[in-house]
Image (spheres, rainbow, N blue to C red):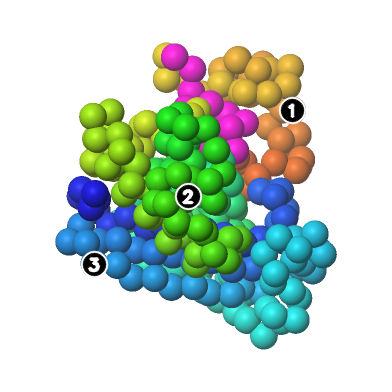
């Protein structure tokens, strides 16, 4: 089934130095841009992460320090990448929990305030897990009857994700609607205010902390009653995007930022 799109949908996959959203860096990014008319564009870029690539990461994706030593840094490609995905919704495999949060961190790290909240996210893994429960290679075999060659290369994973989504729409045509609005809601597991899930919305739409001693307590209340908590979070190893959302809530509660 071809996708019913209001905006271009960019499928993307990251290969990284590790799985820590706050600390790790991108070493390869592949994007597949699908336009509402069905046109497809794919780009893959190697990135110098400016930190060593651990051997265990290389064992997964095969990218070494030598491979990326002469590649551009993320800062050098950030503006071009932001322009390329401007006005697009985003799709991926496990993207809501990993790729999107890490990409947001990279943008913020280089001083580019790229607002990820203006777009919808379709996580093909979540659809798969809700319907069948498995991995990208298994999903590709299950839905497309194909073997995923070159698994854990960003380009192969990106295209496989796109094909899996189209096959999911064919298989579950009575349950899934072919529009990004529905797919975004269906593939969202948590109502996160930040991407990492440290701050979430409760059933009243209020931002609350989702960890530690203040779990379930409104962020504004905690910041008012525990003035030092804000500084503690800013100085701790939380993702930059989490700190950005926390700061916005603090400024808003002080009347310095509009809702």
Q: Earlier in the sequence, mark 2 or mark 3?
A: 3
Q: Is residue 197 magenta?
A: yes
Query: Which residue bears the numbered disc 3?
Result: 39
Secondary structure beneath disc 3?
Answer: loop
Relative to 54, residue 125 above or below: above
Q: CA distance from mark 1 to mark 2?
A: 51 Å
x, y (%) of residue 241?
Answer: 57, 45
Dot 3 surroundings within 10 Å: few (below 14), some, or many (20 or more)? few
Q: Residue furthest left?
A: 37
Does 255 appear in magenta? no
In the displayed structure, 48 sits above or below 132; it is below
Between the C-alphas of marks 1 and 3, the distance is: 52 Å
Residue sitting at 50 percent across and 64 percent down? 156
Residue in the foreground of this view, choosing between 139 and 192: 139
Viewer-nearest residue: 92 or 131: 131
Under tag 2, what secondary structure? helix
Judged by its main secondary structure, the magenta piece is: loop
Disc 1 secondary structure class = helix
| Res 25 seen here | no
Q: Is residue 55 visible?
A: yes
| Region in magenta | 191-203
Query: In the image, residue 247 lies at what x, y percent?
Result: 57, 38
Please report contact status of discs 1 and 2: CB closer than 8 Å, yes or no. Answer: no
Look at mark 2 in the image and give the residue it sits on.
141
Give the residue number, with chain letter if any, for mark 1: 228
């Amino acid at each position: 089934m071809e996708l019913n799109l209001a905006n271009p949908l960019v499928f993307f996959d990251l290969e990284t130095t590790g799985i820590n959203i706050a600390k790790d860096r991108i070493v390869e990014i592949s994007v597949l841009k699908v336009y509402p008319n069905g046109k497809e564009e794919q780009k893959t870029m190697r990135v110098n992460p400016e930190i060593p690539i651990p051997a265990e990461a290389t064992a997964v994706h095969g990218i070494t320090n030598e491979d990326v030593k002469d590649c551009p840094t993320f800062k050098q490609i950030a503006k071009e990448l932001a322009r390329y995905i401007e006005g697009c919704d985003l799709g991926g495999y496990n993207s809501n929990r990993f790729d999107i949060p890490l990409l947001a961190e990279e943008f913020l790290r280089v001083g580019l305030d790229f607002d990820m909240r203006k777009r919808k996210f379709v996580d093909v893994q979540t659809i798969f897990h809700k319907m069948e429960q498995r991995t990208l290679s298994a999903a590709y075999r299950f839905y497309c009857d194909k073997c995923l060659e070159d698994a854990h290369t960003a380009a192969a994973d990106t295209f496989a994700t796109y094909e899996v989504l189209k096959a999911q729409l064919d298989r579950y045509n009575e349950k899934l609607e072919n529009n990004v609005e529905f797919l975004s809601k269906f593939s969202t597991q948590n109502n996160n205010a930040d991407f990492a899930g440290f701050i979430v919305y409760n059933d009243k739409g209020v931002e609350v902390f989702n960890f530690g001693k203040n779990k379930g307590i409104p962020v504004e209340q905690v910041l008012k009653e525990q003035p030092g908590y804000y500084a503690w979070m800013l100085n701790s190893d939380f993702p930059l995007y989490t700190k950005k959302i926390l700061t916005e809530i603090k400024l808003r509660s002080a009347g310095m930022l509009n809702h």
